[in-house]
Image (tube, rainbow, N blue to C red):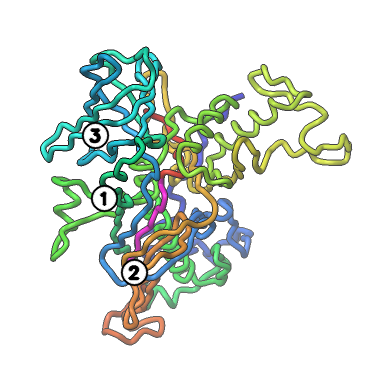
Amino acid sequence: MAILATPGYQLQPAAEQVALQTNYITNFNFLNQYLPDTYEKEFERYGNRTVSSFLRMVGAEIPSNSDQIKWAEQGRLHIKYTICTASLVAAGVGTFTITDAGITSVAIRVGQTLFIQVNASGASNRAVVTAVSTPAAGPYTVTVAFYEAGVNIANTDVCTIFIYGSEFKKGTNGMLGSLEAEDEIFSNRPIILKDRYAVNGSDMAQIGWVEVTTENGATGYLWYLKSEHETRLRFEDYLETAMVEAVPAEAGSGALAALSGGATPSAGTEGVFYAVNDRGNVWGAGNPTTLAEWDTIVARLDQQGAIEENVLFVNRQMGFDVDNMLAGLNGASTAAAATPSFGASYGLFDNDTEMALNLGFTGFRRGYDFYKSDWKYLNDPTMRGSLRAANSVNNTIGTVNGLLVPAGSTSVYDQIMGKNAKRPFLHVRYRASEAEDRRYKTWITGSAGGAQTSDLDAMEVNFLSERCVCTLGANNFMLFRYGN
């Protein structure tokens, strides 16, 4: 039987902006002969409600003293062009016009040898470069002499070209020109996050009847302390989820107008999802459920950094889909069934009737090592959990099921430090100097609760952080979501 929609889970079970009568136990009328039995301790019906820990598991926090973080990442070592139109192909020679997007020069030089393949048919030839034309206004052309007597490329064919070597006649001069190392420069900017909790002095003196506790271990009978602790935990969650979800404000957007100002008119920052969507890899068909689909993923990773070990942070359904796929590979299971039936031989299961059968996997190896971990943020119904996935009409672009994160660290040139540095692929940069540390600031104002900063009869707890996340080598990440 399917789970009924009613009754369901509450999405806003306890949050109130201020301390109200409803936040306190007020129904103890001692003139009533039917006094209720009460439990002294508050029942934690939602377990651990926090969703943070992802960035703590995969990254680090590093100080920065600038409004902008910049770093350089290596470009490709070898050179390849994929939109090269053939012309003047006759008598063993030909000319190719290179029109790949974003190029401002051509790195092919006279004397280099090329592999040339027609994109549509796959027919190919090899050739040596005899002339290169790179006018400032374009177009860029390369003239070649084919090695084969029979040329498989015709005029107007669109081809892919890459360099595989060079060849020169005896007694000739050396290679003309040189190639500079190609780096890609990326940048991000920190954003300021704030929160506040306030309670007036009178409510701080209110009698509490039920013992309360929070996820950080704070316990007691004072409701205002519980609310302050929950504000703190909520803010700590936002420190992480903002780094995951944030996007830069686009030109002409309302956020840019509302938040920009001063010498640097900008707003927003590149979160992890944005960075991977923009310059990483995206699986747009929901969850990969077959070995053939994972082979496609492995083939894409081969074309990128080929990091040996990777961690999959997934929602519950994607975790189940991976488990079912791996179980379906077991010879004793019914792989063709809609729901695989797990046989006696499952992993290291030794047929012990006293042993609880583990129906899940922590990882697998297919070309690379993939370790699987549930990501609570993607399961929590108050966050990304239970968001619409897809329907038969149109996939919901942006519904994230999982994220593949390469393990380890990478070497980048840090422009602030002025040298190469080892950095985790994901790490947080927060503003800090000798005079000010904005990693996680908290301070109390007012005249209650020990504060003596103003004549306000209240205690106000303020929270602030200024930070951004750096996604190094985003080409090694993969986002699993719906939508193409």
Q: Secondary structure at mark 3?
A: loop
Tell whether position 469 is magenta: yes
Q: Which residues are magenta?
A: 462-474
139 vs 122, left or right, is left
Tell whether 305 sits left or right of 18: right
The residue located at (74%, 39%) in the rendering is 358
Looking at the figure, which quarter contains the N terminus?
top right
Closer to the N terminus: mark 2 or mark 3? 3
Marks 1/2 in contact by CB < 8 Å: the verdict is: no
Q: Does label 1 or label 2 sit earlier along the sequence?
A: 1
The CA distance from mark 1 to mark 2 is 26 Å
Looking at the image, tell me whether mark 3 or mark 1 is earlier in sequence order.
Answer: 3
Image height of 436 relative to 74, above or below: below
* Badge number at residue 101: 3
* Residue type pointed to by label 1: Pro
Residue at disc 2, secondary structure: loop
Are discs 2 and 3 less than 8 Å apart at CB?
no
Query: Can you say whether 420 is above or below 311 in the image?
Result: below
Q: Position of residue 248 (x, y in %)?
A: 26, 50
Please give the label number shown on residue 237: none
Answer few, some or many: residues within 10 Å of disc 2's Cα (few below 14, many 20 plus, some between 14 and 19).
few
Mark 1 falls on what kind of element? Answer: loop
Position in image of residue 287 (x %, y %): 51, 31
From the top left corner, tell me how far across and down residue 448 is, in percent.
37, 81
Disc 2 marks a residue whose amino acid type is Gly
Can residue 22 be seen at all in this image of the molecule?
no
Q: Which mark is residue 248?
A: 1
Residue in the foreground of this view, choosing between 161 and 234: 161
Q: Is residue 48 visible?
A: yes
Crowding around mark 1 (Cα neighbors within 10 Å: few <14, some 14 to 19, many 20+) is some
User: Which residue was labeled with disc 2?
Assistant: 418
